[in-house]
Image (tube, grey):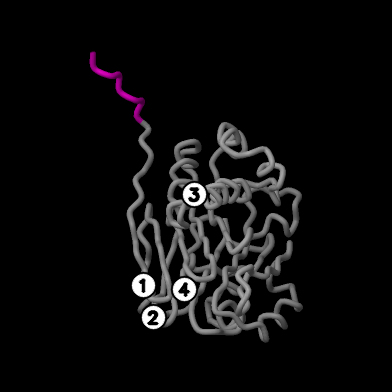
């Protein structure tokens, strides 16, 4: 369980997107307004952002609560970007890995976050390990469900899938293996945003032709925030937002072929 946010638009200081809003991600770490599971997101945080001319994002992650990190307050005041992904974490299971378990996860141009929990982790997804190369499993940053879901998404991206397709197929695969999982995924490459609403809240604020924010919950009371329906894939650029329904995996056994 966590809260996360992605932004595309004109250059802004990190703090104006994460700290300054009255109900921004900074405040959501201790007082989220719409979080359905858990109450405090104090098990780590992270932000990834893109610098002009560099397609590979920078990251700043810590194992503790965002409000206790004075270095981040300074960084957020002066670092500016046109694209970011940030998250505050409420760990599903306590354990090791420290900041390595905090989103955003990253590879190449991509930043990724998972808001939710995989039902029955880790046993429920054990069969899916066979779909990944051994090197990908050994390279996982952390030993939690979010890191494994990221490995599944990343394998699809490396195989050439578009961002939205990679998220949708991963959600359906995990939901089939572990029914009852909450799988709000968020992905950006610095030029577009893909996200899923699957078991928790997701909202977006779009200023067509200017900026797009996709977040677990609104960071202010602007009436233009739109809620994303559950079981939906969101694909956004700086100019538009597209919503596509996702179909729940069938739980019925396959029918016997006719003879």
Front-most of 139 and 225?
Answer: 139
Using the numbered discs, state the Cα–Cα distance from disc 4 to disc 3 in whole angstroms. Answer: 21 Å
Q: Which residue is mark 3?
A: 182
Q: Is residue 240 left or right of residue 24?
A: left
Using the numbered discs, state the Cα–Cα distance from disc 4 to disc 1 in whole angstroms. Answer: 11 Å
The nearer-to-camera label among 4 and 3 is: 4
Q: Mark 1, residues whose alpha carbon is within 10 Å: few (<14), some, or many (≥20)? A: some
Q: Mark 3, residues whose alpha carbon is within 10 Å: few (<14), some, or many (≥20)? A: many
> Mark on residue 213?
4
**Vertical comparison of 258 with 81: above or below:** above
Q: N-terminal of the two: label 4 or label 3?
A: 3
Q: Secondary structure at mark 3?
A: strand
Q: Which residue is mark 2?
A: 207
Q: Position of residue 183 (x, y in %)?
A: 49, 51
Using the numbered discs, state the Cα–Cα distance from disc 4 to disc 2 in whole angstroms. Answer: 9 Å
Q: Which residues are magenta?
A: 252-259
**Vertical comparison of 178 with 65: above or below:** above
> Mark on residue 211?
none
């Amino acid at each position: 369980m966590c809260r996360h946010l992605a932004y595309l638009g004109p250059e802004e200081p990190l703090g104006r997107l994460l700290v300054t809003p009255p109900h921004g991600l900074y405040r959501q770490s201790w007082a989220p307004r719409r979080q359905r599971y858990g109450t405090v997101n104090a098990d780590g945080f992270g932000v990834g952002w893109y610098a002009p001319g560099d397609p590979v994002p920078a990251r700043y992650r810590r194992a503790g609560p965002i409000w206790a990190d004075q270095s981040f307050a300074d960084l957020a005041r002066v670092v500016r970007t046109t694209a970011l992904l940030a998250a505050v974490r409420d760990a599903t299971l306590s354990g090791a890995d420290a900041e390595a378990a905090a989103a955003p996860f990253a590879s190449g141009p991509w930043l990724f976050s998972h808001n939710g929990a995989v039902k029955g982790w880790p046993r429920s997804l054990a069969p899916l390990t066979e779909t990944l190369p051994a090197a990908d499993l050994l390279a996982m940053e952390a030993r939690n469900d979010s890191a494994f879901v990221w490995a599944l998404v990343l394998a699809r991206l490396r195989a050439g899938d578009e961002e939205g397709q990679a998220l949708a197929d991963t959600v359906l695969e995990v939901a089939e293996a572990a029914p009852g999982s909450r799988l709000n995924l968020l992905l950006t490459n610095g030029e577009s945003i893909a996200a899923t609403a699957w078991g928790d809240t997701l909202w977006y604020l779009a200023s067509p032709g200017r900026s797009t924010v996709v977040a677990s919950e609104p960071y202010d009371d602007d009436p233009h925030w739109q809620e994303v329906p559950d079981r939906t894939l969101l694909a956004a650029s700086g100019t538009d937002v597209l919503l596509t329904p996702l179909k729940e995996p069938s739980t019925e056994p396959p029918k016997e072929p006719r003879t």
